[in-house]
Image (cartoon, rainbow, N blue to C red):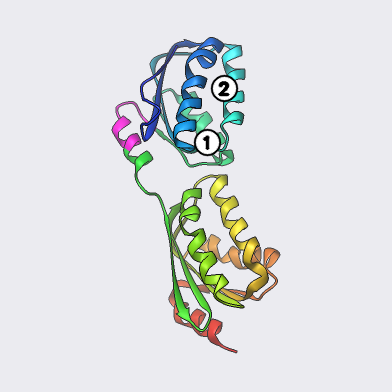
Amino acid sequence: MIEVTSSPDDTVFEFRASGTVTEADYRDVLVPALDRAIEAREHIRLLGRFGADFDGYTAGAMFEDGRLGLKHWRGFERAAIVTDIHWITAAVKAFSVFMPCPVATFSLGEEDDARRWLRESLGSIHHSDLGQDVLHVRLLGQLDGAAYADVTEDLNAFIRGHDRFRLLLDLREFDGWQGLGALAAHFTLVRDHQSLLDRAAIVGDKAWQALAERIGRQFIKAPVRYFPADDFEQARAWLLAD
């Protein structure tokens, strides 16, 4: 069975699964409650608990689970799964890379940690005008799609105020993207403004970030150059040079 333990207006939508979950549990309990929650909030943060008394899904329930994910693909902002059942944890970790939102797993007894993770801010994006048409953008922590939504209008306002601009992308405190939605938001932002970009400097402190120079050249026609973290001032000087 499935028991929904939150109201449509709660910050976190919570449900508990126990016994054998059937198609009727999805159709009569979970789907209507999710529909109401997403209608009330547009995007929700989901907490699902699968305790020791959870016995599995019927075939119909597994089909409904897949349909549920597709129907509400863009409605989930973040998801946490609380369980000690190994196969559920393994499945969530395997498929989390394909999800449009951040997904995390927690052990039973860590429900408060899961709620805290769902409510807290993940990564953030900071930006500043360095003068001479140079935009400094710092990516901090692990970014989800909401981080891009929070700053898109500010970045657009800066770019509208300049005929051309140069970008200093600071990755020294960046830990990557949470979910495909965040990665898609990043490339959408780059694509929308790349025609106005004169040059871009990328500063990072991790080996994989050096690949950003090579990847950036596939999307950006302007010169792109990577600098190690200790060469921040050299990156800035390269951007300002004529």
Which amino acid type corresponds to the residue marked 1 in the rendered image? Gly
Q: Is residue 200 above or below residue 100?
A: below
Q: Is residue 215 magenta?
A: no
Q: Is residue 187 above or below residue 165?
A: above
Labels 1 and 2: the sequence-earlier one: 2
**Separation of disc 1 and disc 2 at Cα?**
15 Å
In the rendered image, residue 23, in percent from the top left (x then y), is placed at 56, 12
In the rendered image, residue 6, in percent from the top left (x then y), is placed at 36, 25
User: Which residues, given as a range, are shown in magenta?
Assistant: 106-115
Mark 1: give few (<14), some (14-19) or many (20+) Cα within 10 Å. Answer: many
Secondary structure at numbered mark 1 = loop
- Of the 4 image quadrants, the one containing the C terminus is bottom right
In the rendered image, residue 114, in percent from the top left (x then y), is placed at 35, 35
The numbered dot on residue 75 is 1
Q: Is residue 152 above or below residue 92?
A: below
Secondary structure at numbered mark 2 = helix
From the viewer's perspective, is 86 left or right of 165? left
- Of the 4 image quadrants, the one containing the N terminus is top left
Q: Is residue 182 above or below residue 20?
A: below
Which amino acid type corresponds to the residue marked 2 in the rendered image? Asp
Q: Which residue is mark 2?
A: 65
From the viewer's perspective, is 223 left or right of 14? right
In the rendered image, residue 142, in percent from the top left (x then y), is placed at 44, 52
Q: Tally the numbered discs.
A: 2
